[in-house]
Amino acid sequence: MSELLKSIPTVDFSSEIQRLQPVVNRMLFQPELEKKLLFLENHKEVKDYFSKRKNFRKLLSSFSSLELYLLYALVVMDQINHLLTFKDEKALANVLAVKKFLLDLVDVDSFYEKEGGVIGYHLRSLKLLQERNFPKEVNISEKYYPPEGIDLTSASPEIEEDVIFGIKSIKEMAEIYPVGGAADRLHLQDEKTHFDLPAARLEFLGKTLLEGMIRDLWAKEYLYFKLFGEQVTTPIALMTSNEKCNDTLIKEIVNDTGGFQRPKDSYKFFTQPLVPTFTEEGKWCLRKPMELLLKPGGHGVIWMLALKKKVFKWLSLQNRKKAIVRQINNPMAGVDLGVLALFGIGCKENKAFGFASCSRRVKTSEGMNILKEVPTEDGYSVVLSNIEYCDFQKFGVQDIPKNPDEPYSVFPSNTNILFADLKAVEEVTESLPFPGMLVNFKEMKHSDANGVESVSKVARLELLMQNIADGFSKPCTKSIEDEPCKDLPTFITFNKRRKTISPTKKQFVPGSGLVETAHGCFYDYLKNAEELLSEFCGFDIPDLPNEEDFLEKGPSFLFMYHPALGPLYSTIAQKLVSGFFHYGAELQLEIADVYIKSMTLNGSLIVHTESVLGDVVDNNLRFSDNTGKCILKNVRIVNKGIDRSCENIYWKNSVERKESCMIDLQGNSEFIAEDVTLHGDLLISVKDGERLTAKNKEGEVVFIREKITDAKPLWNYTLSNNLIKLELNQ
């Protein structure tokens, strides 16, 4: 037996499970509130409890039927004595406190209606605890294989076709963002109020994580516009939570930015229930006296909640048939072609569900994608699924490397980048409302009924979003070992890890490594930039240092860009053609319409325009040719650049500079420079409707300003043999 199992208290919940199972069966058989109430009121535990508290029972007349039902449920579950104290059973304030306490259970009871309500939630938790304490022998007849999928790591005509199909299908696309996580390990707080903030508020590259996802979406929609001349507004469904005011703070981000210049009715917010936490002994936890310690119920609640809150119907009314699901803490998901290929494959092959995957680091808190084979009377049932890291032992999966000298697992990583056929998922949700149930204990502070705090292992019943795929199995007559099971209703893609997942899950601690931190995510961002510039764009750039030197000395170069520059690397490579970076050079391109060829950069160059994609009309962005445009051909930029003596936070894009060349383009404006050197600390500002040209005249740089008489695109986008071709419009 492992050391982990030895540390688990061997509490036997079998008798409690046996006692509660008939109660839950009755809740499922008679779901009407009044019938459930009558049943619980006559239950032995309830009668015994209130026979000893006759004074309090007199006050129950002020309770609604729902409040009485929830109160009786606490009694039946044997949770009331350590949660509620009745110092003065006649005090009205005490009754009001109990009512408020019970209010926190309303959403839990409603959401878990198909499990038997709040008592069903508790019973399921006990069953999972029992499995944890007394694990069953691994079912050796159930086998797991590394799934075969579609390789996106190198270009091919098939992948190019999938990407274009994804772009063409954008009018059918919705995006779904689970943004309601607690983000406890980030320790993210408001600098002034010290109030806990959600992960969506983490600033990465100078933008919140939520804004980064919206910018990735803008880039896909803009690419569609440039190819087909039509603006598409993708509906976005955001699942929030009420923990730490998450729902309010997420809506504040959207509202404070004017909805990111998107129509208000293109957003749909729905809030996931907070569920009770419990100890290893199965006792519910308090945050403080008369207040439960509640946590979000896991991203897997998203499907049933979307059904209950009519999110599927909202998307259907907008003719959206497919969706991309992205988790908030992974900024790398939108890089290059990964999401567009995932979407294109799912649409083209009419798949029900899909995973974007990559290699998985061993010993990390990531799930793994597996191909599961289960024997049946007629052969086998095969399903593409996920096993979460805390359940590896339960399913007999070893977290070992594929090769002894590599850090990567035999099985690929579940990245929570998903493709979903909305109708198929909605139908499966009816029969699989609570996918991937598990308990995962973590050290957490909690209180007893008298306010005495302690720290112990605490968990809650969690659901797994990706395990809705368990509902899409396929029968096969032969074992996978003998013959591959073809044409599954699900699929999986494989891409480079740094172009698929680099989560910002926890705060960086010196000496603990970069994995799952914003520092590590930024390092991956720059590794991607290194690949883009050197392998696609023909730039000569300094090699990035190793992780240790990166932390100590900072990056050897900086390159940040608006996603609409591409987002495909093949598109960006037609805009950035060649160049040379000196050590420490910085290039930031907050622009989509740019052409750079044969540029030498020694210092900092920042090209910025507010009109990246077009005009803002009534606070809504309208794609057009009224954008900032910049052409740099055979240009040298020389300045002192980044001040490396300062404490720069590169991953936040909080950088101090000694000097820089800033090109600020307002509205429909253009800056063109050819065969010149832009030297020193410069701010080049070009007004709306103006073209500024920098030329070399007898060894001096001269600037010529002129009016733009009409707005025309810098680039003409066309499709040719599933490739996007750009032609400079000069």
Image (tube, rainbow, N blue to C red):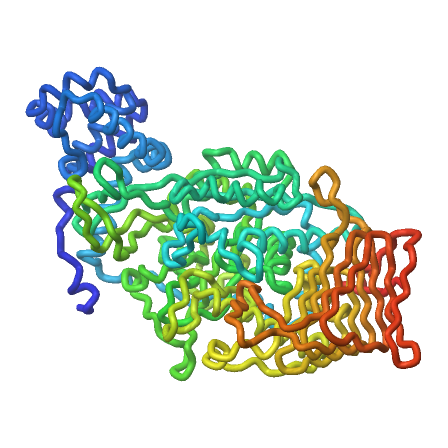
Identified at 37% across, 36% down, the residue is 111
Q: Quadrant of the N terminus?
A: bottom left
Position of 513 with respect to 496 (left or right) is: left
x then y, percent, for residue 459 = 27, 51
Q: Quadrant of residue 543?
A: bottom right
- Which residue occupies 74% across, 79% down? 600
Residue at left offset 80%, top offset 77%: 677
Image x and y of residue 718, in percent:
82, 60
Q: Where is residue 525 drawn, in percent x and y?
A: 56, 69
Q: Is residue 603 left or right of residue 647?
A: right
Q: Is residue 42 above or below residue 172?
A: above
- Is 604 in front, or is 246? 604
Front position in the image: 631 or 271 = 631
Residue 571 lies, with reference to residue 224, above or below; the image says below
Res 134 visible: yes
Side of 708 relative to 186 (left or right): right
On-image quarter of the C terminus: bottom right
Q: Is residue 265 above or below residue 94?
A: below
The picture places residue 201, in percent across and down from the top left corner, at 49, 52
Residue that appears at 21% across and 55% down: 456
Q: Total marks drawn?
A: 0
The quarter of the displayed image where residue 722 is located? bottom right
